Amino acid sequence: MSTDRLDIVRPDDWHLHLRDGEALASVIGHTARRFARAIVMPNLKPPVATVGQALAYRERILAAVPAGMTFEPLMTLYLTRQTTPEEIFAAKASGQVFAVKFYPQGATTNSAAGVSDLATVYPVLEAMEQADLPLLVHGEVTDPAVDVFDREKTFIDQHMVPLRARFPNLRVVFEHITTADAVQFVQAQDKHVAATITVHHLLLNRNALFDGGVRPHHYCAPVLKREQHRRALLAAATGGDARFFLGTDSAPHPREAKLADCGCAGIFTAHAAIELYAEAFEEAGRLDRLEGFASFHGADFYRLPRNTARMVLERRAWTVPDTVPLGSSVCVPMRAGSQVPWSIVDASAG
Ligand code: NCD
Ligand code: ZN
């Protein structure tokens, strides 16, 4: 494979925030230009908690896809204290809901409706195990006594280990992993467990939060970690292990919501996602493994057909705009005002 040109099967994004209304209309084209499908996060206000809400949201997403682009939203339900086993079986039967997302209450943006303790929803998890509907886990404890940089590791010990022991056949995606501890945990599990890795956690360590001053556009949940963790994530993503796959966690917020006394968590990467992943894989000298990570491993885990359309990337640098439109406001994208070395040549093949 030439190192200036990459010809891969069209990728999918297995963890994406699309929002709703005019924000949805602003961001969907960035993703649809790059990805054939995406697992769409349900943390709207109010949350997407029922099959009816998921199907209605799916229609709004499809209606917002720009003309000439093909994009398939893969819907999820938000696990709340009200979720019932019946809703799980209805979700599976709908054919349009592919997973259920667990947010620890208070862990991140729009997580107030989340569940504080997985043990309180065991009947729902039993139904998911039976229906073979994967559980997507935001793996951070919210205990204020636990240091924010240790919340993922503590979640593994306190919640992941008991979850696996109690529901060995429940398929689990450990979302947006950020630590070497999470990599090791996933590697030690069987085929029921996988993990998504964002591009910002592959390219940035926590120094990016304090680069000459505080950098709110690099603040996300889970927060960026030390360089040793970034290296472990890069090794996992580029290692060829099918349990690790692409999930951007692209999370658009209006600039004023980030530049506030209490700024929102979330980094927007949809405008350059696959190009930035190519940059990360190149750093590791493993451009040859981008296709598996971006286009095959996730589809295989979700038991969906792999895409057949192709996408070509080439080494041609471009400058990311300072802002991208977001409804009546703007969003500051990752790498704003700076260069990305890779460009898409032809994304219309899908
Ligand atoms: C996400 C958001 O803004 O919806 N924010 C983030 O920092 N990743 C929520 C989430 O996935 O935690
Ligand atoms: Zn997310």
Image: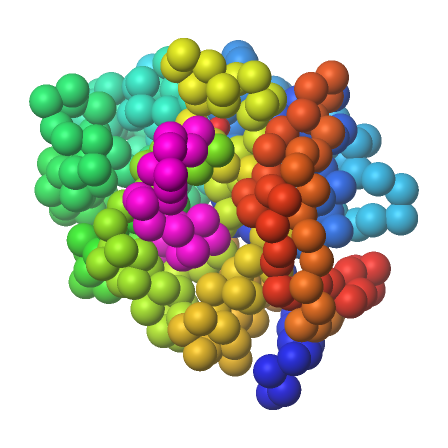
Q: Is residue 269 visible?
A: no
Q: How is the image coloured?
A: rainbow
The image shows residue 149, relative to residue 185, as above or below, that is above
Left or right: residue 202 versus residue 267 is: left
Q: Is residue 104 visible?
A: yes
- Magenta segment includes 201: yes
Left or right: residue 67 versus residue 262 is: right
The image shows residue 330, relative to residue 290, as above or below, that is above
Point 46% across, 14% down: residue: 260
- Magenta segment includes 141: no
Question: Where is residue 332 drawn, in percent x and y?
Answer: 60, 33
- Where is residue 180, by image quadrant? bottom left
Q: What are the residue bounds of the magenta stretch?
A: 194-216
Residue situated in front as seen by the camera: 158 or 262: 262
Point 32% across, 68% down: residue: 235
Point 39% across, 20% down: residue: 111
The image shows residue 118, relative to residue 338, as above or below, that is above
Point 49% across, 73% down: residue: 282
Question: Where is residue 316 drawn, in percent x and y?
Answer: 71, 68
* Direction front: furthest residue: 212
How many numbered circles does the render carry? Answer: 0
Left or right: residue 262 versus residue 71 is: left
The image shows residue 342, relative to residue 105, as above or below, that is below
Quadrant of the frame with the C terminus: bottom right
Left or right: residue 148 versus residue 319 is: left
- Where is residue 321, by image quadrant? top right
Question: Where is residue 68 drawn, in percent x and y?
Answer: 89, 48
Residue situated in front as seen by the camera: 17 or 282: 282
Quadrant of the frame with the N terminus: bottom right
Question: Where is residue 73 drawn, in percent x and y?
Answer: 66, 41
Residue situated in front as seen by the camera: 337 or 78: 337
